[in-house]
Structure formats: structure tokens, C-alpha cells
Amino acid sequence: MAKRSSNWKHLELDWDSTAWPADGAKARVLLVAINVPGYYSLPVRILSLVANQSRALLERFETRYVELKNNDDYERFIEIMANWLPEIVGFSVNIWNLEACVHVSKKIKEILPDVRVLAGGQEVTNSVIDYLTKVPEFDYIIDGEGEIPFRQFLENWDPLSSSLRDPLLVSGLRYRENGETRFSGPGQVVASLDEVPSSILAGLVPAHQKNLLGVMLEGSRGCPFRCSFCFEGGRKSKVRIASIERLRQEAEGMVSLGATYFHVMDPILCNSDLERLRGLTAVFERLRAANPNTVISVEVYANRITEQIAECLKPCTIIDVGLQTTNPATAKAIHRPFLPEKFRQGVEQLRRTKSSFNLYLICGLPYETLTSYLRGVRFVLDERPTRVFFNELCLLNGTELRRRAEDLGYEFDPRPPYLVTSTAWMSERVLKIAQVLSKEVEKRYNLSARAVHTTAPWLSKETIGKGGRLPVRLNSGCSLKCPGCAAAESACPAKWDNAEAVLNRAADMDIELAGGDGLVEGPLLRLIGQLQLAGAARIKIIAPPSTFRDFDLVEKLVHRGIWHFKTFLLASEGESAVKGDKVASMMNDLESLNRPFPLRGYAVIRPHLEIVLVADGAMPRQYRTAIESAASPHVTVITVPESVRKMGDEWVEVLAEAFDEGIASNHWIKVPRAIARRAFESMDGCDEILGHLEELDLISRVANRPPCFQQANDDAFVKNQFCSLRDHFGRT
């Protein structure tokens, strides 16, 4: 059993330094990882250990690794790398860095023509593309797992000729011979993951940096399933596992360094031996006992979750459940059987243990129509997961779907990540609609207290309920003086003190706080704090744009848990409630929301912003121009008042066009049902589609007035459960 080895941190090169502290008598091997910012590479760490922990290889080679980000200055890196004078450069090639790897390879070979480039990684494994023909800068490719082939490669390297003595002695190798590409045969793989050098026990994994996915614990390799959209689905390697003892040593070693986030890479977690799962559970429990804020992320199949397995998963903080589709024809085509009742039973076991879990769908799979896809979205939301993820289909290199793309009628971007643009079942327009509505629902749903603050102690798991919406009107003055609005009057309406009733009902509810721009900061923040402690799911502020001019106030709201904002703009100057304001000038008031907000830990919040575009006095074409002006990157949804459907056929035509233009710019335009019908009338199942959109709150029902409007002297308003901010918390 591997124990913590001597520290190998010297294997990582700092590319800010031009020095290579090496033995000049040895051949230099440089392993390069070009990562997405916030992540680290396991392959280059493992392969550097493979070379350095072999006495025979250590006598001949000086093997180091270097990491950079895919937004770094490549030209500067190339200059530094050239000064290192490597003999062999190996790239870990993936969809996020393919073009960068090709570019760096080309440039380094222009400077050092004798250098040899070795490529490996998912993008060049089981590939439908002959990369040795397409990329002349790649001299060799290791197709598959690299530990054994990389060792064989170095063992057979001839430094005098800068080539392999016998390529056939390197398994899994693609190489050139007489102008043609050859393959030495399937790569040899380790029998157990305990044979793989542990980059964690070697001290090569940082505890706090580059860990947006957490510390990666490799529990198994290979997959018994054959999902046609997945890299692993097209590979036939046997499933191999790491021992519980190794995983325990790795996890506890990282905890001792201060790590608090772990991602367990083990897709067979729920169908592995129950005793092994219990052993992992014991490791997880020790981690959580050492630090209750430790986050443990795992992947599971709901169909396989039994009562016993659900109990074992209780220490896990994030449980990812891949559903992908609810359409029977699609499930059959991707080799991923979907049994609705079995799936629901597995999810119910997670709910019974009060576990947090995420559900996933893929948009654009074979045989999936917009209608069947919306059924899947509804199914997912009905299960009330902690988070939802609606992913766009990418035809990944090496997958079955990529190989069958032409037969299945797929159109896709030929550049990584190979996003699908149309299918035989969804035209380009329809697929784009599905993608935009998915991202709107996903963002709105996932910006919840439970999703962002996974381990927050005030979010008792007992507060998980059926959810719902609770409107709360805040008595506050407003500078806009909209006629008939209570907030415009000099005196507040009759005072109510029902805040306690609201707090008692807040658990797992979506709270909508509506008021004028005269909201008082201190009492407002205290009310929000109370609602958070009461277990509110989401808290939305509904107020005029002028409320959000203050960057400091918005930042305080976001850090207190306000991630949903709703306001309004006027489409014309006309005789309106705020005469003289234009869309552009009112948009300036919302600049405070046009930025990411980093929270404690790893979360970065981009608020959900809905704008109601009041049509008061506007003409159809003028209103359409106002929609275009409002469709800025930080606006998530633009809502058209329901009353415009009664304004004539020109409005219907113009807004149906505006809907499509919004989709093209990745904005959901929430239009009334009559206009939505015009946009969807050519599709099969139009009525069902509209019904789903209404249930998803993607059809407008709002009045043609500011959403913060509070009707003065309205008896129904007085009787509803509204609270007075000032009455409950006092004046400041």
C-alpha cells in the first residue's frame, strides 16, 4: 500500500522562471497542461511521477511538468519553453485546449525543430480524426491511458536519432511510417489504481489553489455503461478501482493541508460492492467530523439507489444524478435505460435521508423533440433537486454519436467543444429556443440558498418542503410618484405588522420583496437576514431601476443572499409615470448588476435580472427597438406585458419577430400566450409546448405597469400577507 512518499514538488516548473534546474547529461522531457482557469491536471502529475519513480528512467531523463491557463500569454510561454531546451514535449490534449496545444506545438517546433511532440488525452483517444495527418506538429500520440505506454515510450527512446527504436514496443501508440499513420495496438492499462503513482501522496496537489472542482480522488476508472454521448461509452477497458486505504490516506493527507472540497471520480459508486461503499462512507464521515464544512461531491445513478446505498451517501454534500432524458426512444438510442418509477424511487431515497442532489438533462439528443424535452424539464423540476443542469449536446470526439453524426442528421460546430447546432428532430431555430429556455430555467432555479450555501448551518434539512411563492410588499416611499401607487403618497398606507407570519412561512419559499426606491438599507438588510435564517429558498427584490444605482447597496444585497432582481423600463417617453426617462438612461441604473460577485468559498454569483418593459405610449416598432436596447448581457429575461396582445395584429407580428431576435442573442423574451402561439404555431404539439412554458413561468401574465406598483386603498392588498419593513424593524 502506497504511503506518503518524499516530496516531489520540484517536478513542477514555474514558467515565470527561465531556469530549468536539471542535469545537463539527461534528456529533458517536459509535460504540458493547458487548463481551464481554476483547475489542475492529474495526467501531467501522474506521468511525471511515472518517469521519476523509475530508477532506470531517472538515470536517462529529467522529466518535469508545467501548467498554464488557456487564457495565458502563449507567446511568452513559448519563449520560456524554448530556453528550457526540452527534447520531448508531451501535451495533455482535451477539448478546452486542443487549439492551444496545436498552436504551441507549431511555434516551439519552429524554434526547436529537433524537439519531438507527444500528444495524449481524451481528445486524441479513440479519435474519429487522424490527428497525425491533420496536425503535422504531433510526432506521436498515446491513445488511451498513459501510465504504461508512457513508460514504454521512454524506455524505447533513442536520444541519438530523436526517435523510437521500435514503435511496436509501445502499446497504444500512433506514429508515422513511410508517410502513413500506424497504430501499435490497444494500450496496456494498470490492473489496479493502486499501481498508479499518487500525485496527492507525492505532495503535488495544492490544497487551496486550482481546485474549483475540489481535490480529485480517483476512485475508479472505466465504466460498465455504454452511453453514446460519453467518452467512456466508446471504450472497452475493464473497470478498475482504488483501495479504500489509498483513498483514505489521500483524503486525510489533503485535509491536514487545509483542503475542504473533494470530488470523487467514481461513476460506479452505487453499483460497486456495498462493503466498499461503506468503507468510503467511513472515510467521508471522518472528513466531515474533522471539518463539518467539508464538501464531498460524488456521481450516482438513481436507478441503483436503494435504502442502504442512500444511507451510505448521507455524508456526501453534492450528489450528481445523471438523468439526461426522459424520452423512451432517446433513452434507447443512447443506451441509457430510463425507468421512471425506479428513478423516482432512487431520488425518493435521497430525499428521505435529506441529501442534496443535482439532476442533469442533455438538450439535443437523438429523437428528442422540443415537446419531449420540455416534458423532461418538467419531470426534473417536479423532483425538486438542489440544482438542475441542462447541458447542450457536444458531439465529443471518440463517442458513438460523433461516429454516427451523419446518419443521425446532426449539424455541429467542427471546432471544440463540437456544439450541436441542429438535429433531425430539432431545427436550428427550435434547438436554440430549447437551449435559451433551458439556461433561463437553470439560472433562475439554481440561484437558491440551498444550491449556493450547500453546507450553511442555518439551512436545516428539515426545511425542505414543496416550495411556493410568497409576495411581501414593503412600505417604502418612491421618487417616481406613479399615479395610484401607494408608495408615491406622502403618507404610507395603513400599517401592518405581519412580518412574524411571513417569517413563519418562509421555509423553502420564494420570497418576493416589492417596494419603491425609498427602501431603507439597514432595516432591509436585517429583514433579509431574518428570511435567510428562516430558510427561504430564494429572495427577489422588485423595485424601480433607481434603487440599484448604488453599487455598494447592490453588493450588500448579493452578499446577504439577494440574487434575483426584477425591475422595469419604459418603452417610450410619452405621458408615462416617469415622463422623460428613456430605456438607455434607465439601463444605466442597472450597471451595478452587470458584474460577477465572488462569495466566500468558490461561488461566483451573476444575478438573475428580469426587466418588465412597460408599453405605455409606445408604438410596435418603437417597442421592438426598446427590447433590443434592453437585451444587454446582464439581463436574463425581458417581459412583455400581457395587455399588448389586445393592441392589434401589428403588435403580434412585431413581438413574434422580437422573440426570435431575443433567442438569437440568448435572451428569453417572456411574451403573452397569444404572441407565443404565433412563434410556435409551426411546431408539432404547439398547445402542449405553450402549456409547459406557462408552467415554467416563461409566458407573460404581468400588467402593463411597473412590477413594484402598489395599488393605493386596495382592500385586497390590506388583507394579503404583506409586512411593513419599518414597523417590524423600526426606523434608522
Image (tube, rainbow, N blue to C red):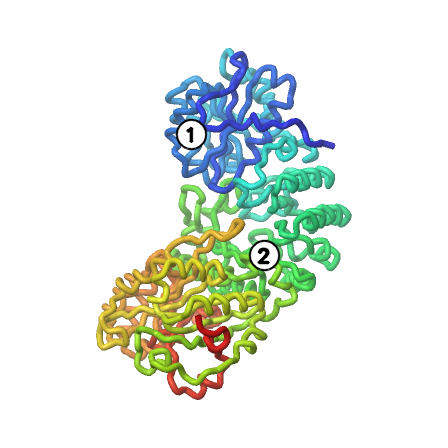
Q: Residue at x 63, y 45 (%)?
A: 264
Query: Residue 75, how many percent across, how many down?
Result: 37, 29
Q: Residue at x 55, y 45 (%)?
A: 213
> Looking at this view, is 242 or 447 the one in front?
447
Which structural element holds mark 1? loop
Which structural element holds mark 2? loop
> Residue 144 has which mark?
none
Residue 176 in view:
yes
For badge 2, the amino acid type reads: Thr
Query: Residue 77, how many percent across, how many down?
Result: 41, 29
Q: Which residue is mark 2?
A: 454
Q: Is residue 548 above or below residue 265?
A: below
Relative to 182, 633 lies left or right? left
Q: Mark 2: few, some, or many residues within 10 Å (few <14, many ≥20)?
A: some
Q: Which residue is mark 1?
A: 135
Query: Residue 220, how many percent across, how many down?
Result: 66, 41
